[in-house]
Image (cartoon, rainbow, N blue to C red):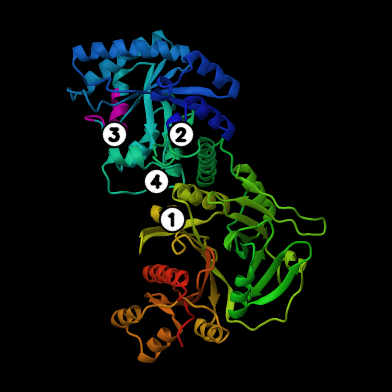
Amino acid sequence: MATVCISGALVDKLRACAEAGFDGVEVFEPDLVSAPESPEEIRALAARLGLTLDLYQPMRDVEGVDDAEFARVLRRAEAKFRLMRRLGVDVVLCCSNVATATIDDDEVSARQLRALGDLAAEHGIRIAFEALAWGRYIDDYRRAWRVVELAAHPAVGVCLDSFHILSRGHDPAGIREIPGERIFFVQLADAPRMELDVLSWSRHHRLFPGEGSFDLVGFVGHVLHAGYAGPLSLEVFNDTFRQTDPARTAAQARRSLRHLEDAVARADPSLTGLEMLPDSAAPSGFDFVEIIAEDTSTIEHLLARAGFTSRGRHRTKPVTLWSAGRARVVLNEQHARGRTPYLAAIGFEVDDASAMSRRVAALRTPRAYRRTYDAEEELEAAVAPGGTEVFWAQAADEGEPAWVSEFEHGGPRIASPVTGIDHVSLTEPWQVIDESALFYTATFGLRTVSATDVPGPQGLVQSRVLAGPDEVVRLPLNVAPPILAERGGPAALSAHVAFSCADVRALARAAHLRGLDILPIPANYYEDLAARVDLDDDVLAELRELNLVYDRTDAGEYLHVYTATIGNVFFEFVERRGDYAGFGAGNAPVRLNAQSASSAARESGGFGRVRA
């Protein structure tokens, strides 16, 4: 990994990379220049940490210049090559010229690279020439390779950077025509698709593999088929990564590279030397959600009014279980002093729990540990970047999972329209959203199915939806506006659980009679709905009466209702009709504003229940 990917001083970066399990690093020149340690000390530290120093970068603007400028290039290169010998690095990255180039001639560039190669060879160094996407004349890897061919020097080869190739839309298939031994280095970066100048895009918005939109699986396949046998290195310029903890970011980076290796191996079994991760299918369903608080009685009352059944108390812990249909909610008061209700964990049902555990271990995913006794079911869990604990358990062939039997003295089952958990929506801190997406895709096989920005009263809420192949498991991840994260705004920062219903109108009516606090929806919404959607007056009146919100697509309909927020949790009850696959995103701004208004009303003592 390039040291530019993470924050901290050079020594901190090296230690973080070693701890994360990297084999080597690229040394970014500004990191060395600003380090108090000598090149020899950095070299010795890397050796002690088990890291190789594989590339020194960058050396800029070395070709396409007049003779006077090239003389200055050679003097600069001589000094850099002596430094590299002290550091113990034998490959230097030379970028295509963006600043001083005055001659658009491949022969001139080749002649100058050849002379640079002669000087480098005297020091035992090789030059990896890279076409920058914003190079003045050379901005395509295919032209860079033509120049290297013309140079015809054994110390001059190419560096291939996925960002510079894929951001410009260049066809990477031509990589296979480059002899593998002439590819001196390969750098990898993912990125989101953006309408932005390529330099700003590159310097601020690169991502680790699997977090963006680039086809890195295909890119790496082309590189390996060319016969390249050197390092696959991450070079990711990202403002967030350079502000966050280097050890955590390095671990995230290593996980992304391991996930990419697995994806390449599965996409092309003819490639050798790649290691797949243990096979593990995506979750087959939600097992449970867990809410922690010092006092969970308010959640208990809410669930009872929504038609859930108390399944009793755990036989050894201050934990209760509530269920309706296949939906299970665990309420935990253990080690929760001073905490208001928050969504602490989700559980997945998986078809092979043992394989999932091996996959988590292979990805070096942080684990969650809780005390269990000999007679209790031991559930394994990982810690997501946002702090949510994610459990997995073997899906039961029939009936309920074994851990449910640990709850005793439950009440009689209550008939409920609730059938299961439709989706769980998590709010992620802004600095971990990309890491969170990678966590769920690499570890649990979910994929991003949609992304949108939702306007709220304090700004845009970014949202991306992850789902399993059959979308039985749906997991929206939201990033609230920074101002709300700072202020702890209750609306945008709340996580919520959406329960699927056979008849959400019946649930809303019954819940109202039991006294459930339902989020009031403003009358303006229903006037707008009547103008947008052709609904019978009776249907519209019922929606208004029950505070139901509505969405329709060509595939089907979506009816949903929200509860009041308790602590940092609220619930949603949804009914999907036909093949509707969305989440009523158009209704989210109404919900956000209604929650903000309700929060203010509660603080002033004016919040009431659903209007009759």
Q: Residue 301, which numbered label?
A: none
Q: How far apart, in angstroms, are the residues tagged by discs 4 and 1?
A: 35 Å
Q: Where in the figure is residue 255, as x and y percent of width and height?
A: 54, 41
What amino acid does circle 4 point to?
A: Phe
Q: In the image shown, does 255 or 292 lie closer to the viewer?
A: 292
Query: The magenta stretch spans which residues?
Result: 136-147
What amino acid does circle 1 point to?
A: Arg
Q: How far apart, in angstroms, are the residues tagged by discs 3 and 2?
A: 30 Å
Q: Report the residue marked by disc 3.
A: 140
Q: Where in the figure is residue 596, as x and y percent of width and height?
A: 41, 67
Q: Residue at x 73, y 79 (%)?
A: 411
Q: Report the residue marked by disc 2.
A: 7
Query: Which numbered disc flags the more N-terminal residue, 2 or 4?
Result: 2
Q: Report the residue marked by disc 1.
A: 487
**What residue occupies the far right of the structure in this picture?**
374
Query: Which numbered disc flags the more N-terminal residue, 4 or 3?
Result: 3
In this view of the protein, can residue 470 be seen by the observer?
no
Q: Where in the figure is residue 234, as x and y percent of width and height?
A: 45, 35
- Report the mark closest to the observer, 4 or 3: 4
Say above or below: 539 vs 441.
below
- Report the mark closest to the observer, 4 or 1: 1
Q: Residue 214, which numbered label?
A: 4
Q: Where in the figure is residue 175, as x and y percent of width and height?
A: 38, 34
